[in-house]
Image: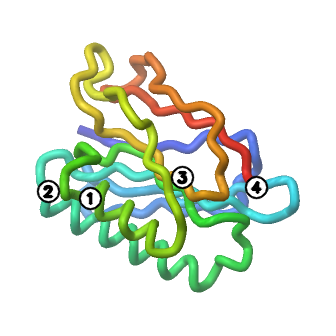
Amino acid sequence: LNYGNAILSRWPILHSQAVAFGRRALGEKGFLFVETEIADGRRLPLVNLHLHHHSRKQRLIQAGHVMKFVTESRSRRAHLWAAPPIFCGDFNNPAHQPDATAMLLGFCEESNNYTLLPKSGRTFPSALPARALDYALMPQECVVSHTEIVRAFLSDHRPVLVEFSLV
């Protein structure tokens, strides 16, 4: 019942924050925010999230927390960013439902043209995937060259790999 997120980067992480949605010591969901350094000295922001798995109401509240955080970060830090944030992680709901994934995609598209990836495939459970719950929301400045759901068993979800270049 101990959940967690991780970000591995070959690029230097210049800024990072771990944000919990609540105060429980065990089983609390949340998100990570990082800014990685890219070649021209600018930063690429990324949000890696893990939303509630049972409650639609809680997922929507959590998505609201993410949007508020990003809005506040954008007002203070956007001058450092080479592109709007990438959002990825365990959204815990299918993309086609009016739920947190759709809410976050709508928020992203208010300021940019985002793509929801993967376009097809299932990520949960990792042994025999039956549901699509894990996504990456990519801004138009990220030109995607490859996307795949990786067959891996390090988690109860399969990871989504997105290769892209920044324009």
Label at residue 56 = 2
Binning the other alpha carbons within 10 Å of mark 4 as few (below 14), some (14 to 19) or many (20 upward) gives few
The kind of residue tagged 4 is Val
Position of residue 153 relative to residue 106, above or below, is above
* 124 relative to 17 in the view: left or right: left
Residue 100: which disc? 1
- Calculate the distance from the C-alpha at mark 3 to the C-alpha at mark 2: 23 Å
Q: Nearer the viewer, mark 3 or mark 2?
A: 3
Q: Is residue 15 left or right of residue 111?
A: right
* Numbered badge on residue 138: 3
Give amino acid for label 3: Met
Secondary structure type for disc 2: helix
Residues at marks 4 and 2, CA–CA distance in whole angstroms: 36 Å
Rounded to the nearest whole Å, what is the CA distance between mark 1 and mark 3? 16 Å
Q: Which residue is mark 4?
A: 167
What is the spatial separation of the Cα atoms under label 2 and label 1, in whole angstroms?
8 Å
Residue 159 is situated, as x and y percent measured from the top left of the image, at: 45, 30
Asked whether the residues under the numbered discs 2 and 1 touch, taking CB atoms below 8 Å apart as contact, a structural biologist would say yes
Amino acid type at image mark 2: Arg
